Image (tube, coloured by chain):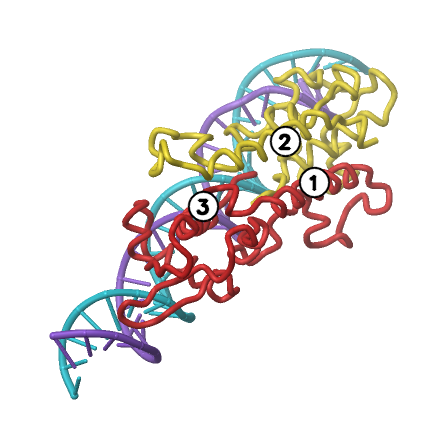
Chain colours: A red, B yellow, C purple, D cyan
Amino acid sequence: MFQLSKKIEYALIALRHMAMGHAGQIFTAKEIADKYHIPYDLLAKVMQKLAKKGYITSYQGLHGGYTLTRNPSELKVSAIINAIEEKQTVAIIQCEAESPENCIIHSTCTIKNPLVRLQTTINKMFDELTITEMV
Amino acid sequence: MFQLSKKIEYALIALRHMAMGHAGQIFTAKEIADKYHIPYDLLAKVMQKLAKKGYITSYQGLHGGYTLTRNPSELKVSAIINAIEEKQTVAIIQCEAESPENCIIHSTCTIKNPLVRLQTTINKMFDELTITEMV
DNA sequence: TAAAATACGACCATATAAGTCCTAATTTTA
DNA sequence: TAAAATTAGGACTTATATGGTCGTATTTTA
C-alpha cells in the first residue's frame, strides 16, 4: 500500500523526458521505452491515456509520436494519476471512497475524520507537484 | 493504491474500541469482531501482531483477552501500520523502497526527490496521528 | 476435564497490477 | 501503391497482494 503504480512511474518518467526536450519536440513511445528500459506495450498504453486526456498530443503514422500539449508547469501529478488510474485512487479510507452507507459504525465513527484530513493534505500535495519540479 | 488495508482498518477499529473502555479493561477478539461485523480470524491475527509488538497485552485461557498496554495517546498510527504490514509500506516510490541500485536513471533522476519529500510529509502525519484523535 | 480464549501456520479465493500479444488504422516515403 | 513506422486499443496471461478461512495447538479457569 501507499505506492505509486508502475504505470504512474512510467508516466512520470515519460513526461519528464519530454519536458527536457525542446518545445514541440516529437517523441515516440518506443524511443522512451528503450531509453529507460520499460516495457513498450505498457508505456504505449500509458501514453495513449495521457493523450486521450489531452496532456500530450499524438501524431499517427510514420514519424509520428507525441508532443507535450502544455507547459510542464501545468502538468500536475494529481492530474496524471487521475488520467491513468481508473478508480478513485487516493482514498485512504474505503468508506469514503466507495460505500459510506455500508459502514459498520456509521454515525458514531470517529476514525474517519482524522484520516480524511490526512487525505486532503495528500491530495493537495499531489496537486501542487508538477512535472517542472522533476526536470 | 493509496488505501489503508483492511487489516489496518480493523486494527484501528479495535484499538479505538479498547481506548473507549476503562483502563485495564479486557476485551476479546470475538467480542470486537461481533460488534463491528468483521471477520473473527482476521481480526484475531491482527490483534496477535499488535500484541507481539507490545501495543496490547494478551491474556490466554478462559476469560482471557487483550488490554491496551499504554495510553492511547502513545499509540501512533504509524506504529500500528508498521506492526501489521510486513513490507515497508508507506513508500510511494519503489526505487527508494527496495532497489535503488536497479534504478534505470540512477544518478540523473530528478523524479525521486520531490516524491521523497512528499513521502516524508506523509510519514510525519501518520506519526503525529494517535488513537486519541479517533475516540 | 471441559470450555473459552489466544497462537499460529497453512491454505484458498479473489482482486489488482504488470506485462504480453494481436490486429487495426494512420501517415509518410520510396 | 506498397512497405514501413507509428499510434490505438482490445484480449489475454501471469504475478503478486489482499482478504478471508481452516485446523490444530496451547493456555487458563472453573
Label 2 element class: helix
Label 1 element class: helix
- Residue at image location 67% in from the left, 44% down from the top: A124
Q: Chain of mark 1?
A: A
Q: Residue furthest front?
A: A22
Q: Quadrant of residue D3?
A: bottom left
Q: CA distance from mark 3 to mark 1?
A: 21 Å
Q: Which residue is mark 2?
A: B121
- Residue at image location 71% in from the left, 38% down from the top: A118
Q: Which residue is mark 1?
A: A121
- Residue at image location 75% in from the left, 26% down from the top: B130
Q: Amino acid at mark 3?
A: Glu
Other residues around mark 1 within 10 Å, as few (<14) / some (14–19) / many (≥20): some
Q: Mark 1 near mark 2, Cβ–Cβ under 8 Å?
A: yes
Asked if badge 1 and badge 2 are on a common chain, one would say no
Q: Which residue is mark 3?
A: A9
Q: CA distance from mark 3 to mark 2?
A: 20 Å
Of A46 and D30, the residue lying toward us: A46
Q: Chain of mark 3?
A: A
- Residue at image location 76% in from the left, 48% down from the top: A103
Q: Amino acid at mark 1?
A: Thr
**Residue B28 at x, y = what percent?**
75, 26
**Residue A1 at x, y = what percent?**
55, 39
Q: CA distance from mark 1 to mark 2?
A: 9 Å
* Lower position in the chain sequence, tag 3 or tag 1: 3
Label 3 element class: helix
Label at residue A64: none
How many circles with numbers are drawn on the protein? Answer: 3
Q: Chain of mark 2?
A: B
**Residue B63 at x, y = what percent?**
77, 19
